[in-house]
């Protein structure tokens, strides 16, 4: 999902067209094997309801989407935002059920969890689940098994993430992740505008851009999953119930089959262990499952590298190697003490040499990490997807302890900031207390 739904919809089309004109098909990732893929459709009974106020038009769109999926023998999971149901919504949902698709919970009011406290958010999820379950109970009793976080935002704190997961487990719902995130929704408004204006040329351009954008997302994000898991991975494609889909899904699905995707059921795809890999990714913006898992690994690697660096520094100090100790400081590092600020690696080394003239004076140093935090921010791909950015810095609070013969043990705290550059972590700030 994009960081902000006010993203200019024309920007995506421009990027897709520019990319398509400069990159050949041979440059796209080549996938090995056959990938089972689950098609999921958000915002049922219909997305962009304000663009389609007419009940007959809403039914026409729904029937068009269902016809395309029937042609390709797709059994999808449709995620219902109950606030969207409205006067004719139950009729549209019944059409999805009659076509053999499963319905899941996408909340009642489509709240943003990063801007909502856990209590009201969970209440909204349960309100949506209860309404959908009552609808299903009256039609044979299919259980609400799956839930998808609106905007793919699972919370901006670990406490919020865990609170939602606790609720879901207690209510018998399972998070339905997305592995192929994309911006298909952003084509809807320009498509409807062009159709109403009778602008055939613009519709043709939008169709071309839609196909380029979705195909690129499918290939690149599937390749990421295969690389991360180390095998052919199942995929979960996110689409929206909208008019542009009635015109573009057939071509998209036909192309997908030609590139090694096989349409699969919710049970098959969600039964793969890769879809149950645990993560505790939190952030303002969401993203696909593979990106979340990749970020977790990057974070773990960054923290482990910094902790190893602290051990190396302590060992260098203890053997009397000041050059080795300071070698981990960046050339422009700042060392902050109660006496002032020392700027630059060479100046820091000179300061230490003046104060610790011998190995005996240096003694034995230990550095105990108390709290290590990765520093990162969201990034936006060329196609408008919010992605977890790489870990570019790490801060560490550590307790230092110095033992020297004939002197009492000295101890204190230090706050270190590390920056990654050239594949190595460097101390850029050191505030010792």
Image (tube, helix red, strand yellow):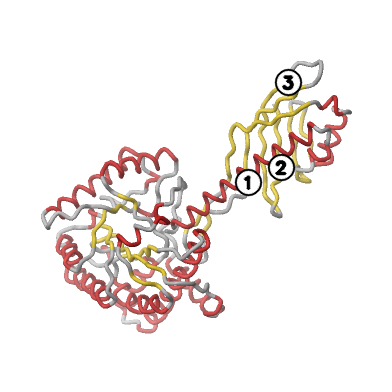
Task: Give the mark, 3 or 2, whose residue is nearer the N terminus.
Answer: 3
The image position of residue 416, as x and y in percent, is 67, 37
At x 77%, y 30%, the residue is 340
**Secondary structure found at label 3:** strand
Say left or right for 200 vs 45: right
Residue on which the image places disc 1? 393
**Along the polypeptide, which appears first: circle 3 or circle 1?**
1
Q: Establish if 116 lies above or below 243.
A: above
Q: Residue at x 56, y 46 (%)?
A: 300
According to the picture, the residue beneath numbered tag 3 turns out to be 410
The correct choice, above or below, for 164 with respect to 231 in the image is: above
For the residue carrying disc 3, how many other residues have a C-alpha within 10 Å: few (<14), some (14-19), or many (20+)?
few
Name the foreground residue: 240 vs 265.
265
* Above/below status of 169 relative to 262: above
For this orientation, the residue located farthest to the bottom is 201
The numbered mark at residue 428 is 2
Percent position of residue 77, x then y: 28, 62
Tell me the quadrant of the picture where the N terminus can be found.
bottom left
- Give whichever of discs 1 and 2 has the lower sequence position: 1
Location of residue 359 with respect to 158 vertically, above or below? above
Q: Secondary structure at mark 1?
A: strand
């Amino acid at each position: 999902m994009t960081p902000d739904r006010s993203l200019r919809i024309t920007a995506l089309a421009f990027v897709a067209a520019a990319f398509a004109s400069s990159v050949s098909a041979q440059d796209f990732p080549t996938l090995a094997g056959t990938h089972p893929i689950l098609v999921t459709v958000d915002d049922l009974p219909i997305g962009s309801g304000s663009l389609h106020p007419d009940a007959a038009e809403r039914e026409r769109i729904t029937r068009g989407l269902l016809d395309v999926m029937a042609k390709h023998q797709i059994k999808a999971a449709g995620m219902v935002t109950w606030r969207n149901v409205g006067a004719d919504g139950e009729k549209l949902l019944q059409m999805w059920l009659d076509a053999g698709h499963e319905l899941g919970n996408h909340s009642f009011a489509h709240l943003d969890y990063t801007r909502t406290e856990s209590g009201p958010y969970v209440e909204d999820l349960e309100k949506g689940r209860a309404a959908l379950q009552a609808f299903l109970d009256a039609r044979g009793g299919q259980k609400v098994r799956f839930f998808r976080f609106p905007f793919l935002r699972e919370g901006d704190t670990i406490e919020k993430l865990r609170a939602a997961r606790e609720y879901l487990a207690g209510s018998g719902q399972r998070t339905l992740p997305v592995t192929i995130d994309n911006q298909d929704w952003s084509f809807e408004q320009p498509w409807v505008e062009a159709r109403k204006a009778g602008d055939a040329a613009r519709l043709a351009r939008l169709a071309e851009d839609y196909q380029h954008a979705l195909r690129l997302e499918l290939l690149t994000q599937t390749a990421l999953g295969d690389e991360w898991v180390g095998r052919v991975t199942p995929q979960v494609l996110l689409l929206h119930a909208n008019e542009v889909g009635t015109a573009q899904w057939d071509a998209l699905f036909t192309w997908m089959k030609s590139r090694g995707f096989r349409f699969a059921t919710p049970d098959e795809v969600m039964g793969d262990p890769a879809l149950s890999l645990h993560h505790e990714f939190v952030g303002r913006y969401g993203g696909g499952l593979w990106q979340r898992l990749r970020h977790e690994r990057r974070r773990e690697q960054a923290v482990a590298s910094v902790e190893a660096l602290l051990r190396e520094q302590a060992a260098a100090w203890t053997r009397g190697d000041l050059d080795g100790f300071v070698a981990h400081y960046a050339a422009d590092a700042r060392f902050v003490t109660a006496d002032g600020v020392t700027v630059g690696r060479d100046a820091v080394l000179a300061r230490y040499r003046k104060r610790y003239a011998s190995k005996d004076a240096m003694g034995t140093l230990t550095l105990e990490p108390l709290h290590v935090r990765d520093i990162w921010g969201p990034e936006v791909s060329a196609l408008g997807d919010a992605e977890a950015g790489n870990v570019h810095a790490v801060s560490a609070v550590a307790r230092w302890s110095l033992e020297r013969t004939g002197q009492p043990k000295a101890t204190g705290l230090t706050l270190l900031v590390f920056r990654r550059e050239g594949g190595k972590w460097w101390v850029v700030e050191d505030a010792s207390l």
